[in-house]
Image (spheres, coloured by chain):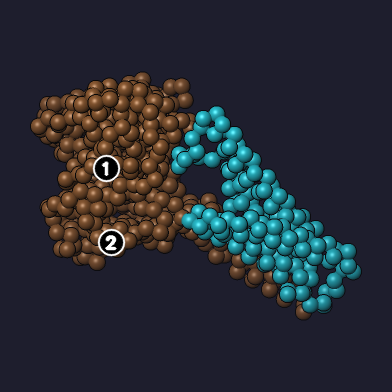
Chain colours: A brown, B cyan
Amino acid sequence: MRQSVRIIIAVVAALAVLVPLGYFWFDSLVPSTYNMVAMGRPDSGGGPDAHRHGGLNVADLKGPSGTADVAVTLVARSENGRYTLNHVTPGPEIRARKGQLLEVTLINESVADGITLHWHGVDVPNAEDGVAGVTQDAVPRGGRYVYRFVAPDAGTYWYHSHQVSDDEVRKGLFGTLVVLPPTPLAAKVDTVLAVHTYDGRRTINGRAGVSPLAARPGDQVRARIVNTDAGPVRVWVSGADFSVAAVDGYDVNAPGPVADQAVVVTAGGRIDLAFTVPSSGAARVDVGAGAALAAGNAAGTPEPRSNVDLLRYGSPAPLGFDPGKATRRFDYKVGKWIGFLDGKPGMWWTVNGHLWPDVPMYMVTTGDIVRMTISNSSGEVHPMHLHGHHAVVLSRDGVAASGSPWWIDSLDVGDGESYEIAFVADNPGIWVDHCHNLKHAEEGLLAHLAYAGVDTPFRVGGKAGNQPE
Amino acid sequence: MRATYRVLALLIAAGVVVQAAFIAVAWFQVIHELDSGSVFDKNYEGNWGHMGHTIVGSGVIPLLAIVLLILSFFARIPGGVKWAAITFGVVALQFLFAALSFGAPIVGLLHGINAFVLAGVASIAARKARLAETATPVDADTPVATA
């Protein structure tokens, strides 16, 4: 063979390897500034085409004006390797009553990357949702942003930064929000347990180990557990039977007594436990890794082996809508595959078979009844979190829910599991729908739900350096 | 070019050794941290051993394997293309085993064993290059061995 022919063959072979690789690499690159609604693969879920942007501006979808019932100012700082709000982490616990107007003024004193506050689990108007680059610009050092919204439902919620969220939440930029019902609760002791792992230490309200629970014999206790971590937390009660009073801010219908079982709190999720302190005065709530709240110096019982199955817990009740009349059906299949993520080779999360940013953009119109099947074959659990809406679990692995309506905003979908959920599209805007293991969101496990005709003036990247994940 | 091919192949084999060292130090580090009361859970971000293993495993070694394959088309080493392609394939398989191991940890055994296969095939590729270097220079009309 002649030398020239040989070289041509070699060049062709080299190109056959390089061109596809180069294409995949180049194709994965994400512009430094982009509009979230221009990314992804539009999916109208089998309903009428809803892929329209423009008309309604996210920035206009604000909470009401008027005098606030509860006004709070939160000053964010970077201090001692952590992020604080008003010098503490977790930030101040905010309490309000259902229907009250909240006004939270966020001031960034010294967080270099900028900050936002997302009201996790609260179905706020879109402009108050606090997602940098989608519903607002990140608040830079020296800047401020005012959030105003009416607390729509009683329950346990939390707030956290949705700018560079993995790093900022991990290092403490969060706090809790309790919305009380109009009629006072029966519980005499109503306490929040914000579970967070700082530098390898699991804490409750910032304290590692066992902390005192101020409750006396006979007291009814409502323990509001908020999982602000990246993975599931198992919670159990020693010294008393308990009930699961609420999940993700929604009361459980007819919750039964639980003994010798634990409850799994999804990352980002909340569980309210109710129990009565026995006459001995000794009762204790454990959240694992040695962190607990104890009344009467109660010792902890060993961690129970089985978990309360929320698919069957409590009694059925009307949902308020008919999932059988769904107008759109979506798939949210989480997988893992080899490829480039913004030019970086590795094994990355996929949604419906594609790597970010080629993930679905779920298009809906106001009033739609939406069913979504979330399945996971990625090898790891994913706590899936949809902003701005509460969804009800219809089934798991084909087994229909038979207990109380199980309303969620954060749902653990384990490897090999498949959940079908349903919700009413009643809150126009652009809502991210992502994994609340925030490292995973950063690695591309973040899609969004967009209402037809809504557009955002905000950009990911850009001058504000918006980085919602 | 043959020398470069040989060095690349040896670097891949050496990379396997580095990977074994990284993953060992990563998990001893975790175990050591547990002794001081640290929690190992989903919040754990990995230590420098994990990070090194990720960088070398999903960046450096695949890049070397691709460069080796491309170089092999030009290097005129008997068996050079074949062994570069096999090396590339074994690297791809290593990725696959890693991906599957998160859901089915038992597959991790194959990830570990396949690492030694990679070191083996990369060493064979290096040997092919050395043999070609020491042999009489190839005549311009000698067909290029591609298999």
Residue A10: image location, x then y, percent: 69, 70
In screen coordinates, is A148 left or right of A296?
Answer: left
Rounded to the nearest whole Å, what is the CA distance between mark 2 and mark 1?
A: 22 Å
Point out the tag, 2 or 1, that comes first from the N-terminus. Answer: 1
Tell me which amino acid carries mark 2.
Answer: Val
Who's the residue at 57% across and 65% down the image? Answer: A19
- Same chain for labels 2 and 1? Say yes or no: yes
Report in which chain the residue with disc 1 lies.
A
Q: Residue furthest bottom?
A: A1
Label 2 element class: strand
Task: From the image, tell me which residue sits under label 1.
Answer: A258
In screen coordinates, is A211 left or right of A273?
Answer: right
Residue A263: image location, x then y, percent: 32, 43
In screen coordinates, is A264 left or right of B91?
Answer: left
Q: Is residue A360 above or below residue A208?
A: below
Q: Quadrant of the C terminus of chain A?
A: top left
Task: From the image, tell me which residue sits under label 2.
Answer: A399
